[in-house]
């Protein structure tokens, strides 16, 4: 094998946090196989971080100055694993403009600046690679952009956030409340100190925007994607889910309908036999439907140091192999029209306070509705609605709210 490794590529890692230290470990531990697959030695020449790591061998290659990296012509691949948008954007753009390949795991950066950075990489004849930005270690983006090229993609649906999937799984399996699970998850280091981006669905929203852009070839603006998180999901909601032989999952969905593309992120009730229902804990899964290949599912660790680093390093190897060749990705700057949510077809479980009188009124509004009750909450009931548009669903809930208390509304699949 060693005979095959004749060349060398120098890389720089921006950020020595969870992912950056994982990248260092993967490159060091798996150097033999990595060098063989790259056809050259991958050498970490710099690591950029504001901190010092006196106890770690990384200190030998540590720098605090980005210019050391940008001005070093021997650096051919820059790995951005810092997080945030503004500073990484400046560094990544600077690296591409200097003719360096860039690999990133930063979904916020890719969702916000993807088309612009893809334009620069093309001009500079280098590669901007971001496999780790969606689904952590799951090889989903390369599958979308390199393997599923013979298909019209009809649908992408995924559990795209490990933190929220862990929280919902714990709530379901151990009968716990949202706040308690979040606290434990933070203590264990699974959830960030500021968990807003995860629990409010913003992280999953950026990921479904990236997946949609690669699936349909235009730029999805994540700000136009309806996004709801899991902070309003309670123990009682989980009881209703169990009664309906379903589970609640935070899903990102994007559909290529005949009338246009629709997309959203929201907690949904999925029947227990749905392929995404058994994706538990911090795992992610992405379900893709192509018009020729049919249904596909990708499953694995969507977060964590080594799984994410595995995807980052696979991109470093791809960059090394193509170091003199720009490989195009089908993602143009043209804006993707996303259908107004008003027309999106949904069903929902609507929880309402009250008894028989309220049930009658609710059924007068949701004419095809079905009433269900649970022992855990005797002062309320739920209506499972028929198929509605998002607009009529909201209007009907508003109408009911005038003389009764609507406690929650959770969407369900509306495909039957
Ligand atoms: N916070 C993210 C998650 C990390 O929980 O899935 C990976 O993007």
Image (spheres, rainbow, N blue to C red):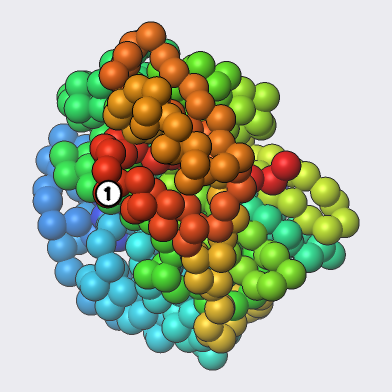
Instruction: Determine the image quadrant of residue 53.
Output: top left
Left or right: where 389 falls relative to 96:
right
Q: As rendered, which of 328 and 72 lies closer to the eye?
A: 328
Seen as rendered, the residue at the extreme bottom is 123
Q: As rendered, which of 365 and 258 lies closer to the eye?
A: 365
Q: As rendered, which of 120 and 401 lies closer to the eye?
A: 401
Q: Is residue 153 above or below residue 356?
A: below
Q: Is residue 328 above or below residue 160?
A: below
The quadrant the N terminus occupies is top right
Q: Residue at x 61, y 40 (%)?
A: 368
Residue 382 in the image, given as x and y percentages of width and height: 43, 29
Q: Residue at x 35, y 62 (%)?
A: 108
Left or right: where 195 falls relative to 205:
left
Q: Residue at x 35, y 22 (%)?
A: 355
Which residue is label 1 attached to?
A: 402
Element type where label 1 sits in the image: loop
Q: Taking the image as drawn, is residue 402 in sight?
A: yes
Q: Taking the image as drawn, is residue 321 in sight?
A: no
């Amino acid at each position: 094998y060693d005979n095959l490794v004749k060349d060398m590529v120098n890389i720089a890692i921006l950020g020595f946090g969870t992912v950056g230290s994982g990248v260092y470990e993967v490159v060091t531990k798996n150097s033999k196989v990595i060098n063989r697959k790259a056809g050259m030695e991958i050498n970490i020449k710099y690591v950029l971080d504001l901190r010092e790591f006196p106890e770690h061998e990384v200190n030998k290659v540590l720098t605090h100055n980005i210019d050391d990296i940008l001005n070093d012509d021997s650096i051919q691949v820059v790995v951005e694993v810092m997080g945030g948008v503004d500073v990484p954007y400046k560094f990544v753009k600077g690296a591409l403009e200097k003719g360096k390949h860039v690999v990133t795991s930063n979904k916020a950066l890719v969702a916000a600046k993807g088309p612009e950075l893809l334009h620069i990489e093309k001009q500079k004849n280098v590669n901007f690679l971001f496999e780790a930005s969606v689904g952590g270690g799951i090889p989903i983006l390369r599958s979308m952009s390199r393997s599923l090229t013979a298909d019209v993609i009809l649908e992408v649906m995924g559990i795209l956030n490990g933190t929220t999937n862990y929280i919902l799984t714990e709530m379901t399996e151990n009968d716990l409340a949202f706040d308690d699970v979040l606290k434990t998850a933070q203590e264990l280091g699974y959830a960030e100190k500021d968990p807003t981006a995860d629990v409010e669905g913003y992280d999953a929203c950026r990921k479904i925007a990236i997946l949609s852009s690669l699936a349909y070839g235009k730029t999805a603006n994540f700000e136009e994607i309806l996004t709801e998180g899991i902070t309003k999901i309670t123990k009682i909601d989980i009881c209703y889910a169990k009664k309906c032989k379903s589970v609640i999952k935070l899903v990102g969905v994007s559909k290529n309908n005949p009338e246009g593309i629709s997309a959203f992120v929201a907690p949904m009730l999925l029947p227990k036999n749905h392929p995404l229902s058994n994706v538990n804990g911090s795992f992610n899964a992405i379900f893709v439907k192509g018009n020729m290949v049919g249904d596909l599912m990708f499953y694995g660790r969507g977060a964590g140091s080594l799984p994410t680093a595995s995807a980052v390093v696979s991109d470093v190897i791809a960059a090394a192999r193509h170091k003199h060749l720009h490989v195009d990705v089908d993602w143009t700057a043209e804006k993707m029209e996303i259908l107004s949510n008003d027309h999106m077809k949904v069903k929902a479980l609507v929880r309402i306070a009250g008894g028989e009188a309220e049930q009658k009124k609710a059924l007068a509004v949701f004419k095809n509705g079905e009433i269900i009750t649970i022992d855990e909450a005797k002062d309320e009931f739920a209506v499972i609605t028929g198929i509605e548009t998002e607009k009529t669903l909201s209007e009907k809930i508003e109408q009911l709210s005038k003389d009764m208390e609507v406690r929650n509304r959770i969407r369900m699949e509306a495909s039957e």
